[in-house]
Image (cartoon, grey):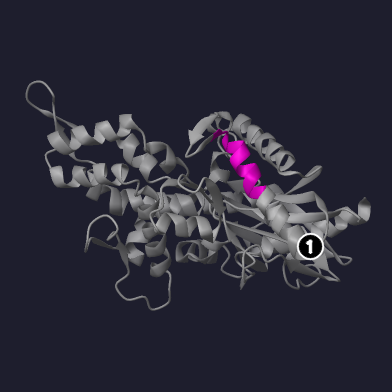
Amino acid sequence: MMPQTLGIDFGTSNTAAGLMAGDRPYLIEVEPGKTTLPTSVFFDTQRKVTTYGSAANAALIDGREGRFMRALKSVLGTSLMREERQIAYERLTLIEAVARFLRTIKTRAEDATGLQLTHAVAGRPVQFHSRDPERNKRALVDLAEAYEIAGFSSVEFMFEPEAAALAAGVLEPGKLGLIVDIGGGTSDFSIFRRKAGETQIIASHGVRVGGTDFDKAISLDRVMPLLGRGGEIRNDIGEGTYTAPNAIFNDLASWEKIPFQYNPETRNMAGVFAKRGLDQRRFQRLYDVLDMELGHDLAFAVEAGKIAVNVPDAEDPMIDLGVLEKGLMVPVTPAHLAAELAGHAASIRTCAEETLARADLSADQITTVVFVGGSSLMHVVRDTMRDLFPQATLEDSEAFTAVASGLAIAAAQADARR
């Protein structure tokens, strides 16, 4: 059987994979009835099995004993990737955890197609870590190693917005398009044109800002104060108080750092806050979140509230924290989001402007803006791009699968060269 190449969009929040079927991209059914798989892993302590995707999310919601992980892509390039640690019922590194997820995608694609998929064309952000060049380089090394461990004999990497440009709709000759790919962990841009039947990339750029950063900002502003963020704690000796340290709340609001908060030291710290805090009820909630390992439950609640605000004609959207305390709800409105995400919106705009500068173009030369990625559906992103490109036509691609479709096209091109 001739080995073939699989296109894989390993995302911070969701993953998809595809091949070419004739002259069209074909997306693999990576879980029953779906062509996207949540990038989630659950290590089930009682059953001593690991589940992925929706099954992992369900295990968390069902309250099974174990360890849940999401947004592992955001940890690439950090020292956490190569630290062997006890995760539920076994010891392993996070590179091995990522490799197992990728191996699951490979196996499911082979089972679905009957093909031997030993090569990969893999998506990657333009910048894994836009503020740290060394960490950015290490992230690609980490990801390449994970693909090798997963069983791929070779892997080619392609910038995700450039893959999306391959799959973008019709663009008139001489016109310029801009891919705006806002994913879970990064925001990426590619300016492209069609010439002689081919897609030409003129410039690409990216910044480490994405949907998980949106979630963190909302959580810090709307949820973490209910757990004591900003609260005062009585000194152990003498009079006076000190403010609860921000680090514990920052980490608990960060998808990729939540699993590492469930340790005796952090629980003991929260226990002290609950006893000595001026507002003991709020700090008790913090202790309960750590003791019952509810960090991801709160993060999902924040994400659901964020999505609800962006639903047309949404009425009184709320962040439902009932999993922590019956009836605990937090209002969240478009005005809240506009304020909480203003800094991230500014970073996204600046990155788009820098992409234009790299191409030596002005904003009015872009005729079409194509939105890709789940977080591109956010009003704050649309409003920012509409303000920067008022003359351009705004188009939606397949938010969660456009990159995978482009990688499928690139995979077929790789097979043709082989």
- Image quadrant where residue 195 sits: bottom right
Left/right placement of residue 25 relative to residue 137 reads right
- Residue to which mark 1 is pinned: 19
Q: Is residue 95 magenta?
A: yes
Q: Position of residue 406 (x, y in %)?
A: 74, 61
Left/right placement of residue 90 relative to residue 312 reads right
Left/right placement of residue 82 relative to residue 336 reads right
Q: Position of residue 386 (x, y in %)?
A: 53, 67
For image coordinates 70% across by 36% down, the residue present is 145
> Residue extending furthest bottom?
313
Principal SS element in the magenta part? helix
> Of the residues shown, which amino acid type is indicated by label 1?
Leu
For image coordinates 40% across by 58% down, the residue present is 61
For residue 353, above or below residue 20: above
For residue 377, above or below residue 90: below
Does residue 106 appear anywhere in the picture?
Answer: yes
Q: Position of residue 74 (x, y in %)?
A: 54, 43
- Image quadrant where residue 331 sits: bottom left
Q: Position of residue 1 (x, y in %)?
A: 91, 56
> Residue extending furthest front?
47
For residue 323, above or below residue 257: below
Front one among 332 and 77: 77
Does residue 360 appear anywhere in the picture?
Answer: no
Q: Is residue 19 magenta?
A: no
For image coordinates 47% across by 51% down, the residue present is 212
> Residue extending furthest left?
239
Left/right placement of residue 45 relative to residue 110 reads left
What residue range appears in magenta? 91-102
Instruction: State how many labels appear.
Output: 1
Element at badge 1? strand
Front one among 127 and 235: 235
Q: Residues within 10 Å of mark 1 (few under 14, many from 20)?
A: many
